[in-house]
Image: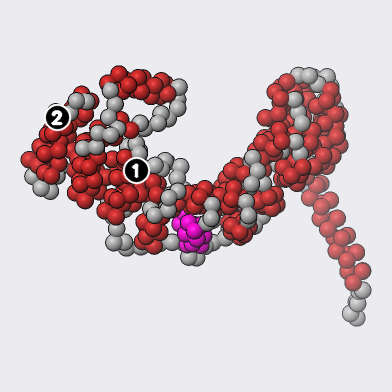
Amino acid sequence: MRLHLWPAGRLYIFHLLLALLVSSASSQQPDWVVQAKADLKSPDSAVRKKALSTLSSQSADISLEPLMSALTDEEPEIRRAASCALGYLKDKRAVPQMLPLIFDKIWEVRRDTYWALGQIGDSLAVEPLLDALGKTNNFSEQVYIIQALGGIDDPRSVMPLFELKPELRDYGLKALGSSAVEPMCDILKHGKLSDHYYAMTVLERVADDRATETLISVLGESMGRSAANTLAWRIGASAFEPLVGQMSNRNPIVRENAIWALAELDFQRKSGNEEVLVVADVLQEPVSQYTYPTSHYPNSNDFSPIPTDVRVISVLLNALKDESGRVRSAALKCLANVHRDDVFEAIVKAMSDAELSEEASLMVGFRKDARAVPFLVPVLRKGNIRAAMTLAKIGSPAVEGLISILGDKSNDLPRREYDALEQERHALFRCGNEPPRPNYDVRVHAAWALGDIGDERARKPLTGALKDRAPWLREAAAEALANLDKKVQAPAK
């Protein structure tokens, strides 16, 4: 005879068998586990400590109940050890029994309980912890409570942590997690200006793509550059399309900050729970007809972005046609170290832009392209001595322009004026400021550049400069001639 059971009957039998198995497993615990549980009730505190140490290394199924019972032990060391052990287990069932220890008379017990609650991360502990934070004036205890609240990451603790007094604010900001994203976004949009910096600090650290829209909306405000950096370095690939959309914004500051963000965008960055956006068309280094130096051009620094994604480069090239000079300048600087022929040609074309001419000509000249010479000579005449170094790199095509500057005495100054200006420049150096490059340096640097080039056409004008009334130019001409002689006598490589 075959027995037919309804589904409900089968489920009942399954649960019955499961209960029997669990009961059998619990009844078959090793003798040492049974003994340790019994020892927790011993009147001898040393025995209880040893039993607690034994149980602390076991799984929650074995140790949870005994550890929770030890939270009420009369010995503070046992309460501390039980609390720490429960923190390692991270079982939320222990939290209700742990909450009274937040107000324990012994500081070490409270301290370890704060840590354990932060490890478990149950929101049930938020209100008691906030209550304890408001009642204590002990700095160390406040820090432990803040860290516990950070481990729980509950929305109820966001503003209390954000609004802590100054000496605790850094700890509070570092404790804030993903639950703080929306409140921080609200502060950036509607909060006090003095709070914007702190809200941006939290959003940068948390790096959650829920903040993208808000960060985009503040690109034109005082925190715009910080928002651009957060989008580029912390949000990553998911910010690409929103940033491109801002290139049509009417505010040039927004477009400028969008350019900086796009140029530094980390396409391999994970944001929130999104997958990494893998860009299939990342630029490969092309074979070029130009000579590209391994170092940056003279006006760049070690933090200059080097965009590699072809879509970003396309946006930057289009930005060179923007109506705003500051936007075009930002795009030019972001393209300075991109080794692509179409980019280089765009930089060459930018030399004809009055607002970009100086920067663009320095970039082109640093790549030893003679097309920069007609633009660099006027730049040097205006007192930008970086142009002299760049002309020296170009070499022979720059000789005639440098000779014309060497013979131009219109910027000559009396020695007394020269010394006064030099003292002013050194004073600016000592104050940490970048001193202006005055015109009286121009002929000196033209002489040095001619000596570096080593072209015989420079010998006659340099020799003539040895008789100039300006002693500083005579000294520079003598150094340049000595350098010229070395280069002429040196064997060709």
Q: Which residue is mark 2?
A: 466
- Report how far apart the C-alphas of labels 1 and 2 lie in the structure: 25 Å
Which range of residues does the magenta coloring cover? 306-321
Identify the mark nearer the N-term, 1 or 2: 1
Quadrant in which the N terminus appears: bottom right
Which residue appears at 7% of the width and 40% of the height?
489
Position of residue 356 in the picture relative to residue 274 (left or right) = left
Q: Compared to 403, does 40 lie above or below?
A: above
Disc 1 residue type (three-letter): Val
The answer to whether residue 356 is above or below residue 99 is below
**Residue at x 34%, y 43% (from the top left corner):** 379
Q: Are marks 1 and 2 in contact (CB under 8 Å)?
A: no
15 relative position to 270: left or right:
right
| SS of the residue under disc 2 | loop
* Residue for badge 1: 379
| Mark 2 neighbour density, 10 Å: few (under 14) some (14–19) many (20 or more) | some
Q: Which of the pair 172/17 is nearer the observer?
A: 172
Q: Is residue 403 magenta?
A: no
The location of residue 428, given as percent across then percent down, is 42, 23
Give residue 174's position: percent from left, percent from top: 67, 35
Q: Hey, which quadrant is residue 20 in on the image?
A: bottom right
175 over 244 or under it: above or below? above
Q: Position of residue 438 (x, y in %)?
A: 35, 31
Residue 396 drawn at (x, y percent): 19, 49
- What residue is rendered at 63% in x and 55% in y? 250
Outermost residue toward the bottom in this view: 1
In depth, the one of 48 and 300 nearer the eye is: 300
Q: Residue at x 68, y 35 (%)?
A: 198
Instruction: Judge by depth and name the residue closer to the eye, 487 or 275.
Output: 487
Residue 378 in the figure: left or right of residue 210: left
Mark 2 belongs to which amino acid?
Leu
Q: Secondary structure at mark 1?
A: helix
